[in-house]
Amino acid sequence: MPPLPVICYSTAMNNAIALAKKLEREHGFNQPQAEGIAQAIHEHESEHLATKADLAKLEAKLETGLTQLQIKLMTWTTVLAEIIIVVPKLT
């Protein structure tokens, strides 16, 4: 997986620091405990962040799928139009 964009990593790290301070201040954890918990949460969350590259790959897949769907729809529309034209001539 490519490295996380700096802005996302920075925001997530700031959140982890804020969490550690809150654990110390409001919940009675000592500094090493609070930092350990915050770091573990930060690492877990970082694994699940989508990068711009991840989103670009997804967008490309969606565009390809949409194009394929449009082609199928045009094919079926053409087939149905031909049926509408041919069936009345058969009766």
Image: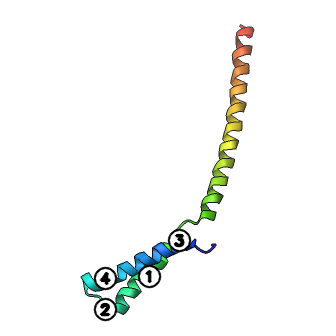
**On the image, numbered disc 4 is attached to which residue?**
23
CA distance for labels 4 and 3: 24 Å
Q: Where is residue 26, by image quadrant?
A: bottom left
The reply to whether callout 2 and callout 4 are in contact (CB within 8 Å) is no
* Percent coordinates x, y for residue 81 in the rendering: 70, 21
Callout 3 secondary element: helix
Residue 40 in sight from this viewpoint: yes
* Percent coordinates x, y for residue 69 in the rendering: 66, 40
Earlier residue among tags 3 and 2: 3
Instruction: Give the mark toward the camera: 4 or 1.
Output: 4
The reply to whether callout 4 and callout 3 are in contact (CB within 8 Å) is no
Residue type beneath disc 4: Leu
Earlier residue among tags 4 and 3: 3
Residue 47 in sight from this viewpoint: no
**On the image, numbered disc 3 is attached to which residue?**
7
**Which image quadrant: the N terminus?**
bottom right
Q: Give the residue at x 41% y 75%.
A: 15
Instruction: Give the mark toward the camera: 4 or 3.
Output: 3
Earlier residue among tags 2 and 4: 4
**On the image, numbered disc 1 is attached to which residue?**
40
**On the image, numbered disc 2 is attached to which residue?**
30
CA distance for labels 3 and 2: 29 Å
CA distance for labels 3 and 1: 20 Å
Instruction: Give the mark toward the camera: 3 or 2.
Output: 3
